[in-house]
Image (cartoon, rainbow, N blue to C red):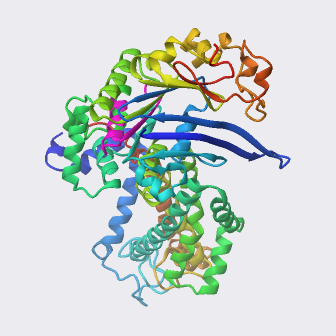
Amino acid sequence: MIATMLGFAPLARARGLSRRSPMAAIGVLILALFVIAALFEPLLTQYDPVAADTTALMKPPGGAHLFGTDANGMDVYARVLRGTRYAFGIAIPAVLVAMLIGVPVGLLTGYLGGWTDEVLMRGFDAMRVFPSIILALAVVSAAGPSLVNVVIVLGVLDAPVFARLVRSEVLALRSGGFVESAVAAGNTLPRLLFVHLMPNALAGAMAQSAVRAAWAVRISTTLAFLGLGIQPPTPEWGAMIRQGAEYMVTGQWWVGVFPGIALILLSLGLNLAGDGLSELLDPRQRKAG
Amino acid sequence: MLLTVEDLHTRFITRDLDDRVRVAEALNGVSFGVGEGRILGLVGESGAGKSLTVTSLLGLLRPPARVTAGRALFEGRDLLALSEAALSEIRGSRIGLIVQSPRSALDPLARIGAQLVRVQRVHRRISEADARSRAEAMLVSVGIPDPRRRLEAWPHELSGGMAQRVVIALALINEPHLLIADEPTTGLDVTVQAQILDLLHEQVRRRRIGAIVITHDLGVVAQYCDDVAVMFAGQVMEQGAVAEVFARPAHPYTRALLASVPERLVLGTGKMLGGPPPDLYALPRGCLYGQRCAHAAAQCAAPPPMSATQSGAARCHFAGLA
């Protein structure tokens, strides 16, 4: 109550969320920690994530280096923190690209049906016949392993997921109800699709967006792990795990395990938050006041 | 006449699993007129084609349904021949539609005020503030108390009767010349039904516009309508002024309807009316009501013309005599 009066609405809302859906609150908390890590990385460590230090090669965790150092003497803790930027920097634009393509296609195919639906959705089906990781591998190795290429490839590959989600919502909405009323009120097709149908068909896609971001993080790190994405010594988690894998057998586990844990945690956070999102985005479930 | 519908035919054309074309003859020459300042009641049992007539007129049909013949003159233009864009301009501004089940007719993710503003801005340039004050005035005129607060309400916060008032406000806010209400009181309790019908009646009278009210309920027609068109199997069987037709029904189906109770129609039992409606995939050649008609004779193997009666017109060979 006081928090609301003082203008701390987010705090009050966070309390509400943790009461209604504790798992979602945990997810949001994990995400918040990663966002802080991405934004304030230079304040959280004294080390430069790409500065080699030949006097401190392969130091185990503890002491001056919280997570130890790698074979170049770079601080693993600083590198894990910096890696957060790459994870978000790929996942968020990739999901945006996927939604930008998938949502309009879903609206159009769902509403119009017929040939538009057949052609566009069968095209998307054809894309999904191939395991996405194989397709991503092929396209990235052909187009070159740049950050922009990875983002575009992941975005295009994930567009069918959003198209399907939105299309199925539109199918349920289009016959009768307010959609028919909107047509009867004289709305043109673009207005109908984007003003009336989109907000109502988007809840599922929005909730799924966090989960798809987790997918994008996993695929992009996989690409890097296979040597096709971002190249070492750039502190990207997949590249770091690849470096660390070489030292696992000799007992220097920390080089690969810490970025691995970060990857799992971020995936978990995104998935938990995604479940919470679907509830929050539905005003029918929002409480008054 | 504000709206004149002539010989409207609508078909559902599909293919079955063996790729044979199947045609359901849903509307078979619907004709009626709506005068300015008059309320036409469109009655008939479930499946007679009442709602389909309206969706055909407004171009709201979805495949496989399509209009195959007919004319519908509204303000000098044939609705059935207009382009989608031209029809969109008429829908919502010159013709307002009130659909069944008001709850689902409102966009669940938009506040009442936003919906009332939107529907104005689809058809005219108007500032947000002007649109809002018009919306508030409109809510007052459909009898919604505390309109300023209601503008901020979400659809799920409204009762059924309140939601129907909002739907009526949405249909009227662009000052249409014709109002079409498709079973406006379905799902409302009886006292609210009466209020809603009173409101519709008053609004139509005050604005001097034409209206079509689709209903199962002959009581509603008797009390609120000026004219009546009785539909059966996609045809208007009899039409005329309500008082005249109800006093001297010329068509056997109208007589059977009047002798029946409305509850039976809704339930679809209709025992007093003698059996199911004809199969739309295989309509009889002659009178469509022939199979159920107690007076069917040899002439009825030929399609009856619409002939003038004392009370209006009826589609029956014996209309003049009966």
Judging depth in this view, the residue of B133 and A211 nearest the camera is B133
Tell me the quadrant of the picture where the C terminus of chain B can be found.
Answer: top right
A113 displayed left or right of B185: right
Give the image location of residue B276, x and y in percent: 71, 21
Q: Quadrant of the N terminus of chain B?
A: top left
* Rendering coords of residue A279 (x, y %): 42, 44
**A285 with respect to B290 (left or right):** left
Residue A203 in sight from this viewpoint: no
- Nearer to the camera, B246 or B88: B246
Q: How many marks?
A: 0
Residue A117, given in percent of the width and then of the height, sits at 63, 59
In the image, what residue occupies the spot 55% across and 59% down? A108
| Magenta region | B162-185
Considering only vertical position in the picture, is B111 above or below A161?
above
Q: Is residue B168 magenta?
A: yes
**Placement of A123 over or under A30, stated as above or below:** below
Residue that appears at 35% across and 68% down: A37
| Direction from residue A70 to residue A134 in the image, left or right | right
